[in-house]
């Protein structure tokens, strides 16, 4: 996972775990709601709504974003976390037009 957390690259299963722990470290509470999953050949785009409260804040903040999960031989080969949904769709070669396709999550 290149370019995450200010340019840090994480590799392998342990790297994925470390990335998650690094991301969650400043948060007192953190929630992720998957809103849509879009299958695109060997990639899966996951559109999410995150919300949380940092240890040093009283207010909760939110983020609407997405990620691209690349699958090879039935295994996750690469994950790209994007700052917004359009960026995630573009990274998967779908562009903005794809927001109406895929699996809605409820």
Image: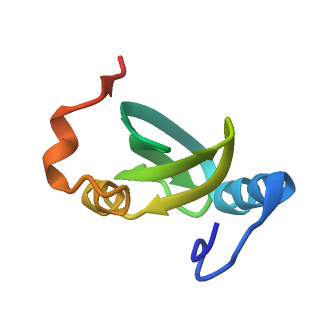
Looking at the image, can residue 61 be seen? yes
Query: Compared with residue 20, is residue 73 higher up or lower down, i.e. above or below?
Result: above
Residue nearer the viewer, 1 or 23? 1
Q: Is residue 35 left or right of residue 53?
A: left
How many labels were placed on the picture?
0
Residue 59 screen position, x and y as percent: 42, 52
Residue nearer the viewer, 105 or 26? 105
Residue that lies at the very extreme toward the right in this rendered image:
14
Colouring scheme applied when the structure was drawn: rainbow
Instruction: Give the residue drawn at x 58%, y 81%.
Output: 6
Residue that lies at the very extreme toward the bottom in this rendered image:
7
Instruction: Give the residue drawn at x 22%, y 32%.
Output: 101
Residue nearer the viewer, 37 or 93? 93
Quadrant for the C terminus in the image? top left
Residue nearer the viewer, 83 or 67? 67
Residue 30 screen position, x and y as percent: 56, 43
**Quadrant of the image occupied by residue 55:** bottom right
Instruction: Give the residue drawn at x 78%, y 65%.
Output: 11
Looking at the image, can residue 63 be seen? no
**Quadrant of the image occupied by residue 98:** top left
Residue 27 screen position, x and y as percent: 62, 54
Residue 99 screen position, x and y as percent: 20, 41
Quadrant for the N terminus in the image? bottom right
Query: Compared with residue 33, is residue 61 higher up or lower down, i.e. above or below?
Result: below
**Quadrant of the image occupied by residue 40:** top left
Q: Is residue 23 left or right of residue 85?
A: right
């Amino acid at each position: 996972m290149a370019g995450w957390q200010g340019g840090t690259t994480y590799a392998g299963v342990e790297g994925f775990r470390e990335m998650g722990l690094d991301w969650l470290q400043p948060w007192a509470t953190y929630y992720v709601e998957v809103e849509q999953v879009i299958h695109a050949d060997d990639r899966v785009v996951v559109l999410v709504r995150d919300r949380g409260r940092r240890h040093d804040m009283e207010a909760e903040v939110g983020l609407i974003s997405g990620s691209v999960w690349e699958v090879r031989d039935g295994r996750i080969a690469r994950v790209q976390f994007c700052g917004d949904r359009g960026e995630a769709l573009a990274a998967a070669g779908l562009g903005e037009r794809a927001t109406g396709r895929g699996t809605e999550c409820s």
